[in-house]
Image (tube, rainbow, N blue to C red):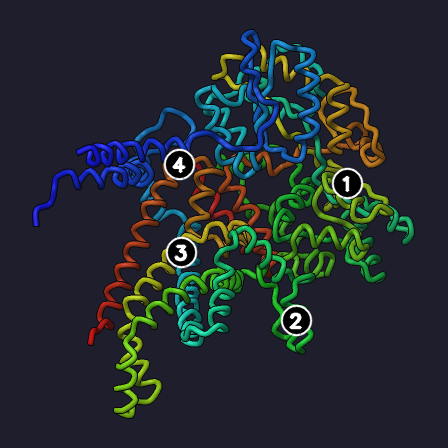
Amino acid sequence: MVNKKFSISLLLLTPLLALAGCAGESPDSSSESESGSEDRTQISFIHWRGEDKEVFDDIIAQFEDEYPEIGVDMNIYPSEQYQATGQRMLTDGSTGDVFTSFPGAQFEAIANAGFFEDLSGEDFVGNFDESLISVGEKDGQQLALPYQLVFNMPVYNKGMFDELGLEVPKSWSEFQEMADTLLENDITPIAFPGADIGPNQFMNSMMMNNAPDEEVFQKLQDGEESLTNEWWVKTLEDFQLLEQNGYIQPDALGTSQDSAMAMVANEEAAMLATGSYHMASLLGLNPDLELDLMAPITVEESEAEYEGINTATFMLAVNSNSEKKEQAKEFIRFLSRPEIASQYANETGQHLTVNDVEYESEVLQNTAYWIDERKTRFQPRFLITNAQVEAAVLSSIENVLGGADPMEAAEEAQQIVEENLE
Amino acid sequence: MKISKSIYLFFLPGLFLYSIFFLYPTVSALFYSFTDWDGLSDAYQFVGIGNYERALTGDSVFRKTVGNNLKFMLMVVIFQTLTALAFAMIVLKNTKTNLFLRALYFFPTILSSVSVAFIWSFIYDPSLGILNQILELLGLHFLQQNWLGNSDIAIYSLAITQIWFHAGQMLIIFVAGLQAIPEDLYEVAKIEGASKWQTFRKVTWPLLAPSATIVIAYTTIQSFKAFDLVFAMTGGGPNNSTEIIATYIFDVAFRSYNFGYASSISVLFMVIIAFITFLQFKALRSDRISY
C-alpha cells in the first residue's frame, strides 16, 4: 500500500519537477540584482550586442555608483534570437524596462504593438544629434533614440589608391575607369560577400542616387511605385555591369564576409562592400592598411545628391508596459552623457549619434568627417518595413548576379511585392 | 488478465508533458492560422480561410519553398538511405575494425548543426574552400562550382551536407536490422544457388523492410525540418533557391511578424509531411515479408 502511494506521488511529482527544470531564462546576463537592498529598484536592460558586454558592465557599474537606488540587470541575446523573441518579452512589462530595437521592420512591429514609451520632450533627447534620430520617430513622437551610427558603404584601401594615383570617383563613368585601372593592376576592385551581408549592404549605396526620393520604398509598399521602374532596373543593371566586367570577384554569391575581408586585408581587393563597422576588423587583419569610406556614385556628377549611407541603429527605448519608467529614463539619460557615450564609442570602435563625443582612435577620427561634412542618407533598406518586400528586393540583386536579366529579375521581385501589399 | 485501474496513472506524466509541449502548441497554431495575429499585440481578427487561400494561390515564395523542400527531401532520402545501407553492409560483422568504422561514420551525428554548417560553409567557399582546391589538385577543375552561390545547385549542396550529417545515424538502424536476419536463411539461399543480387532482393531487403521504413520515414521528416543547417549555411538564398518551408515559416513569423499566416503554413507543412509519410508507409508495407 505504501509502495502504491509512493508510486502515485512520484508520478504526480514528475511533471512538476520537469517544469521546474524548464523554468528560468539563461541569456548572457550580468549585474546581478541585490535583493538585499529593499530601497533599490532593479531595472531590466535587454539588447543584442554581446560584443559590448564588457563596456556596458563598466558603464552600469558607474551608473549604480551614482544612482545607488537603481540597479540594472543587463540581459544580452544573440541578434537573431532578439529579433525573434525580444518583442515578446516586452509584453508584460517585467523585462526590458530599457530595451533596444533595430530600425525598420522590428521598430514598426513594436510601435504597432504600442510597446514604445513616448520620449518626446525628455531633456536627454537634446543630447542626440537631431538629424540622426528621426528614424526613431513615428507619428510625431520620439519613440526610440538610435545610439550607434554606422556607414553602410564600401571601405576602401586608401593607401592602395594613393599608390596607384587613383582618386575617389565622383561619377559612374569615373567609377568604371577607376575599376579598370585596378583590374589592370591585377586587383579585384570590389570584394563582395554575396553569401551573407553583401546584397543588403551594397544595395544602399548602389541605389542612393538612382532613387534619391527617400520615400521610394514606402511608395513601393503602398503600390505607388514598382521595382520594374527605371530607378530599380537601373540599379540592377549597374549590379550586372559590376559582375560582367569583373569589378566584383568571381563566384561572389558564394563568398562569405570572412573571405571578402581576407581579400581586402591581403590587398587582393581594393574595396569591401560592407560598411564602416568592418574597419577595425580589417586593421586587425592587416594593421598597415590605410582605410576610408567610399560609395559608388552611379549617376553623373551633376546628378549625384548623396555621397554615402548612414544608419542610426541600436535604438534605445523605454517599455510602455514598465512600472519603472522614470528609472529607465534615468539610465538612458546617463548613456547619453557625452563622457559616457565617448567611453562607449572608443571602447567599441563605433561612431555614435550623441553630440560632443570625443573619438580617440585613428579610424574613428579619420572617418568622423562623414558625420558632418558629407551628405549621407539613411540606409534605404531599413525604410522597407515589410520583411517579405525587403527579401524580394534583395533576391532580385542575387538573381541578377546569378545571371538573370535585370528586367526579368525586377518583374519577378515585383510580383512578390504585389503579393505582399496590404 | 485483470489490469488495475491505477495503471492508468502511469499515463499521466507523459500525457501531461505531451499536452503542454505538443498538443497545446498544435491546437494554438491551428487556431491562429485563422487569424491575422502579429505575434505581439493582444488584438487579432479572424480572417477565415484567408491565410490558407493566400498560401495556396497567392504566394509564389511559398510555392517555391515547397518545390525546394521536395528536391531536398528526394535527394536526401534516396542517397542517405542508399549510403547508409551500403555502409551498413560493409561494416556488418562485429570486428574491431568495423566497430571503429561504425563509430567513425556515426561521429558527424553528434556534432551540433551549427558546427556542421560552419565546417561545410568553409568547405564549399569558392575561393578558400578545400573542395574546389582538391578538385584543382586532381585536375578536375571543370567540376569546380560556386557550391552555395549558384542558385541551380545550392539546394543539392545543402543536401550533401545533410547526408554527411545524418547517414551515420541511419547506418546504425540498418546494422541492427541486418544483424537480426537469421543466418540460416542466407545458408539456404546459398545452397539453392542464389546470386548475391537475388539473395539481397529475396532475403535481405524484405526482412530489412521494417528498418527501411523507419529510416525513410525518419529521413523524410528530418529533411523537411532541416531548418538549422539551411538557416546557418545560406539563410534561404541565393534568390530563395534554398528557402525551405521551415525557414520560410521563421521568416514570416519572426521577420514579418505575421504569426497568423505563419501558423497556416505550419499547418500545411504538417499535412504535407503526414501525406508523404503515409505514402511511404503504404509503399514499403508491400515489400514486407516474414519467413
Chain identifier of the residue bearing label 2 in the image: B
Q: Quadrant of residue A18?
A: top left
Q: Which residue is mark 1?
A: A280
Residue name at image x 61 percent, y 62 percent: B124
- The x and y percentages for residue A214 are 63, 33
Q: Is residue A137 visible to the viewer in this orientation of the structure?
A: no
Q: Earlier in the sequence, mark 2 or mark 3?
A: 2
**Front residue of this view, candidates A215 and A148:** A148
Q: Which residue is mark 4?
A: B259
Is disc 4 surrounded by few (<14), some (14 to 19) or many (20+) residues within 10 Å? Answer: many
Do dots 4 and 2 share one subunit?
yes
Q: Amino acid at mark 2?
A: Ile
Chain identifier of the residue bearing label 1 in the image: A
Q: Which residue is mark 3?
A: B222
Residue name at image x 30 percent, y 38 percent: B17
Q: Which residue is mark 2?
A: B134
Chain identifier of the residue bearing label 3 in the image: B
